[in-house]
Amino acid sequence: MTYTQAAVERAMKVHEVLMQALNGRQPWIQVAEVLGVSARTVRRLRARYEKHGFTGLYDHRHHTPSPRAVPLAEVQRLLQLYRDRYGPRDGHPGFNVRHFYHIARREHGVTVSYSFVKKALQAAGLGPTHRARGRHRRRRPPRPCFGELLHLDGSRHVWLALVPGLLLTLIAVVDDATKRLLYAQLVADGEGEGTAVVMTALREVLETYGIPGALYTDRAGWAVHTPTSGSAPDRTKLTQVGRARQERRVCGYPTG
């Protein structure tokens, strides 16, 4: 069955407002005011959503429940789980949707799809709705052979679920052709992507796998010298890693 554009937009609005109330971001009495309906209608909409899922929010829909409909209790559990354990708090950004989805499936028995989790968090105001920066660019094809190009990067995050207040930086080296993880190390927050940490990672990779054709990084301080924030890098001034690369003729490293 097809629906008019107005019916689709109305159902999407009702869904978003219901999710905001389920998340505790606004009282149920305000749901009626936002939608311009009575409190009784709100109760009916909530009941239809619990029974039929999103399709139950279309007007005058009377059908058997969809076997793919997610129970309302499961939606509430999902939102509560993210809000209480994995969402932003104390200045930390919290888990992104992809990371939360994997944790929820592995440790909390969540069986719904990633797209459903993402839409539920976004509708409840718990997930970002903007498009990730850079997605509009055409993806570069991977290099054909192992070792032609390696990626080295650091990611600062609360990696350990049992120690939620501990920030660590993950230093990782990945082969571009095979996507194989060649090196990974968690370092204390104070060390970050320091020169000693990066040199240790490079030494481990070089001794284990040999010299790569090129190394791809971001504009980290160990890779290039940037005089001021937001300015272009000054490639005439080599960093310690740059000097080591030049002296040993190890490899070039383009920066993104």
Image (cartoon, helix red, strand yellow):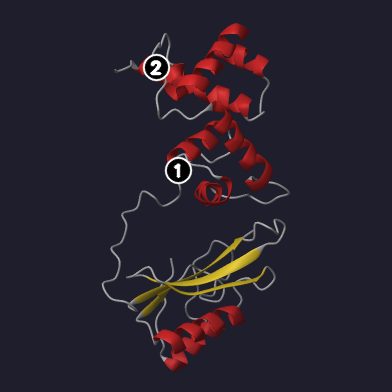
Residue 124 lies in quadrant? top right
Closer to the N terminus: mark 1 or mark 2? 2
Disc 2 designates what residue?
Answer: 64
Q: Which amino acid is tagged 1?
A: Tyr
Q: Position of residue 131 (x, y in %)?
A: 45, 43
Amino acid type for the residue under numbered disc 2: Thr
| Residues packed near mark 1 inside 10 Å, few (<14), some (14 to 19) or many (20 plus) | some
| For discs 1 and 2, the disc positioned in front in the rendered view | 2
Place of residue 194 in the rendered image (x, y in percent of width and height, measured from the top left): 61, 76
Query: What SS does tag 1 mark?
Result: helix
> Is 173 above or below relative to 31?
below
Q: What residue is drawn where x is 55% and y is 76%?
A: 222
Separation of disc 1 and disc 2 at Cα?
A: 25 Å
Give percent across and percent down for residue 56: 45, 18
Tell me if I can see residue 56 in this picture. Answer: yes
Query: Could you say which is closer to the camera, residue 37 or residue 242?
Result: 37
Whole-percent x, y for residue 43 in the image: 59, 12
Q: Residue at x 58, y 46 (%)?
A: 108
Q: Which residue is mark 1?
A: 114
The correct choice, above or below, for 93 with respect to 23 in the image is below
Q: Residue 145 bears which disc, if any?
A: none
